[in-house]
Amino acid sequence: MTPEEQTLLDQHVQAIAQILYREAESRPMETLGEVETVIRAQFQEHVGPQWGIFLSQKLPGQARATSAP
């Protein structure tokens, strides 16, 4: 990853974190367990599905992995 790509990635991660943090403000997060529950729920609802779609797409020049019998 180039330094420019790393900077761009960091900016996007911060933007996503700010959005999720604003949404999380309405939920109770007084213990580490509550923080973990909120973060996990947000990941499963918002991030995970998009990540799964991206990872399931075949990239140009990339063969899909197959399971060996």
Image (spheres, rainbow, N blue to C red):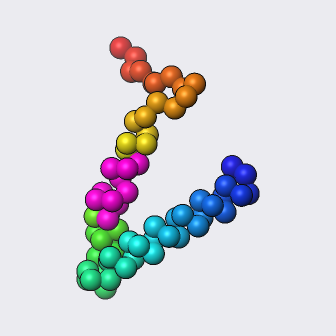
Q: Is residue 62 left or right of residue 5?
A: left
Q: Position of residue 44 (x, y in %)?
A: 30, 57
Q: Is residue 42 left or right of residue 6?
A: left
Q: Residue furthest front?
A: 60
Q: Which region shows up in magenta? A: 42-51
Dominant secondary-structure state across the stretch colored magenta: helix
Q: Is residue 31 visible?
A: no
Position of residue 19 relative to residue 58, above or below, is below
Task: Give the total number of marks visible in the rendering.
Answer: 0
Across and down, in percent, residue 26 comes to: 27, 83
User: Does 4 sit above or below residue 1?
Assistant: below
Relative to 33, residue 56 above or below = above
Q: Residue at x 33, y 59 (%)?
A: 46
Q: Give x and y (percent) for residue 56.
A: 40, 36
Residue at point 32%, 77% (across, down): 24
Tell me, yes or no, whether the highlighted magenta stretch contains residue 10.
no
**Residue 66 showing in the rendered view:** yes
Residue at the right extreme, as displayed: 3
Question: In the figure, 69 relative to 41: above or below?
Answer: above
Name the residue at the top extreme. 69
Q: Looking at this view, is 35 or 10 the one in front?
A: 10
Q: Quadrant of the C terminus?
A: top left
Please name the residue shown 46% across and 24% down the image.
Answer: 64
Q: What x and y, as percent, mark residue 62?
A: 54, 26
Task: Please tell me which residue is depicted at 43% across the width and 42% down the height of the picture.
Answer: 54
**Residue 47, image quadrant:** bottom left
**In this rendering, position of residue 57 left or right of residue 9:** left
